[in-house]
């Protein structure tokens, strides 16, 4: 008998049986179902099929998923090891006459505790063939993963698949669709197939894309009908390569928005923004046509590029982003009791209707922040002094 560890869970009685099974598949199904009922994840560690060669006979060896040793990696990622050398083992072989399969529990003890529930376990949460097809069908219809998960749970209330499994299978689907092409190559193919207007540029003497810009033909048409107001913004760290996705949005006369164009950029330098804006400029049918107002956040490189490419356009700053940043800074510097008051005073400064009211509201804000110089200096140096003409309602 092996030396028993401090933690010892005996599942021998749960798995031992005199029942015989007609096929290998029935054995596997029965053992895994018993395992799930007893909070044990049983895996096949060895599966042999008789080939007539010496030492090759029909048999199945089952282990606990925590059997074996944990393999350390050099990736630097810290994670709890799943394997702890669990000695649990089951052997299944056909009867001597070769008819039915029998089950023998070689070692029914576990050297670890068993979970109270298996929800969230990667093995239990695996998608079945039917579920994979359901995920594939919904993915092709552009259904978001969270809604796909809800659909799976509606079909089977006992389904304990996690959102991670949905994302993993969605990734498999995308790789199958993409084939041998890289992500950028596939993007270019989709753009060409849909007859988008697009430009790209590569690094000098290298087959590496620096920037890529694309716009749908319908978007180009809308842009030329409604060129007055454009909104520009970047999304960060939302793709594998951590490249900024630059989005340009237009606005109709009824205040509805529409996507104008998108661009992946190598970096957020003024030169990259200038290249993107020059391509945007080429979308205008009339060469003297340009947006009257361009709304952005406080991206200094983008603001500089707008001055260069669209010198006649007015560059306003998004109040939502400004108020969000000011609110976060207020929480860092101001005590809780005064935060709401200062937030109200700040909004009054932003919405001042003329220079006189602006001066009065700013004085009130300065008086309230007399003990919080760090906050008032931030507000004045970052926003009001250099940019108040871009967002204060004077």
Image (cartoon, grey):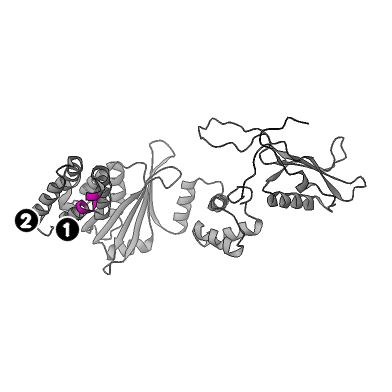
Q: Residue at x 71, y 48 (%)?
A: 35
Q: Is residue 239 left or right of residue 69?
A: left
Evaluate whether residue 313 shows in this view. no
| CA neighbours of label 2 inside 10 A, class few (<14), some (14 to 19), many (20+) | few
250 relative to 85, above or below: below
Q: Is residue 321 left or right of residue 154?
A: left
Residue 105 found in image quarter: top right
Label tally? 2
Please identify the dominant SS of the magenta region.
helix
Identify the mark at residue 356; answer none if there is no mark. 2
Closer-to-camera residue (89/61)? 89
Which residues make up the magenta segment? Answer: 337-342
216 relative to 114, above or below: below
Q: Which residue is mark 1?
A: 351
Evaluate whether residue 81 shows in this view. yes
Q: Is residue 280 left or right of residue 176?
A: left
């Amino acid at each position: 008998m092996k030396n028993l560890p401090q933690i010892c869970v005996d599942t021998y009685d749960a798995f031992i049986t005199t029942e015989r099974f007609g096929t290998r598949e029935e054995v596997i199904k029965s053992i895994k179902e018993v395992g799930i009922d007893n909070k044990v994840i049983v895996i096949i560690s060895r599966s042999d099929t008789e080939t007539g060669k010496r030492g090759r006979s029909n048999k199945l060896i089952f282990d606990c998923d925590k059997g074996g040793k944990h393999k350390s990696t050099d990736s630097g990622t810290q994670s709890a090891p799943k394997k702890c050398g669990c000695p649990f083992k089951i052997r299944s072989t056909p009867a001597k006459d070769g008819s039915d399969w029998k089950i023998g529990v070689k070692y029914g003890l576990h050297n670890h505790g068993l979970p109270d529930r298996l929800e969230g376990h990667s093995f239990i949460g695996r998608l079945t063939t039917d579920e994979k097809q359901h995920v594939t069908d919904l993915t092709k219809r552009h259904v978001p993963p969270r809604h796909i998960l809800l659909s799976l749970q509606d079909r089977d209330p006992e389904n304990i698949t996690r959102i991670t499994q949905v994302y993993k299978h969605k990734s498999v689907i995308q790789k199958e669709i993409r084939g041998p092409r890289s992500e950028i190559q596939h993007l270019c193919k989709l753009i060409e197939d849909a007859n988008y207007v697009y430009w790209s540029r590569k690094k000098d003497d290298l087959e590496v894309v620096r920037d890529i810009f694309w716009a749908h033909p319908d978007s180009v048409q809308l842009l030329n009908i409604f060129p007055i107001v454009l909104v520009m913004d970047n999304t960060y760290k939302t793709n594998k390569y951590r490249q900024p996705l630059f989005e340009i949005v237009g606005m109709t006369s009824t205040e509805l928005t529409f996507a104008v164009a998108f661009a992946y950029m190598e970096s957020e330098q003024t030169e990259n923004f200038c290249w993107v804006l020059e391509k945007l400029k080429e979308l205008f049918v009339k060469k003297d046509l340009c947006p009257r107002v361009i709304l952005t956040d406080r991206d200094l490189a983008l603001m500089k590029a707008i001055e260069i490419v669209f010198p006649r356009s007015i560059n306003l700053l998004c109040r939502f982003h400004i108020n969000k940043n000011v609110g976060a800074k207020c929480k860092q510097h101001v005590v809780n009791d005064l935060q709401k008051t200062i937030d109200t005073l700040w909004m009054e400064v932003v919405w001042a209707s003329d220079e006189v009211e602006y001066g009065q509201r700013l004085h009130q804000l300065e008086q309230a922040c007399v003990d919080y110089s760090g906050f008032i200096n931030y507000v004045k140096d970052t926003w009001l002094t250099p940019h108040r003409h871009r967002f204060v309602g004077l």
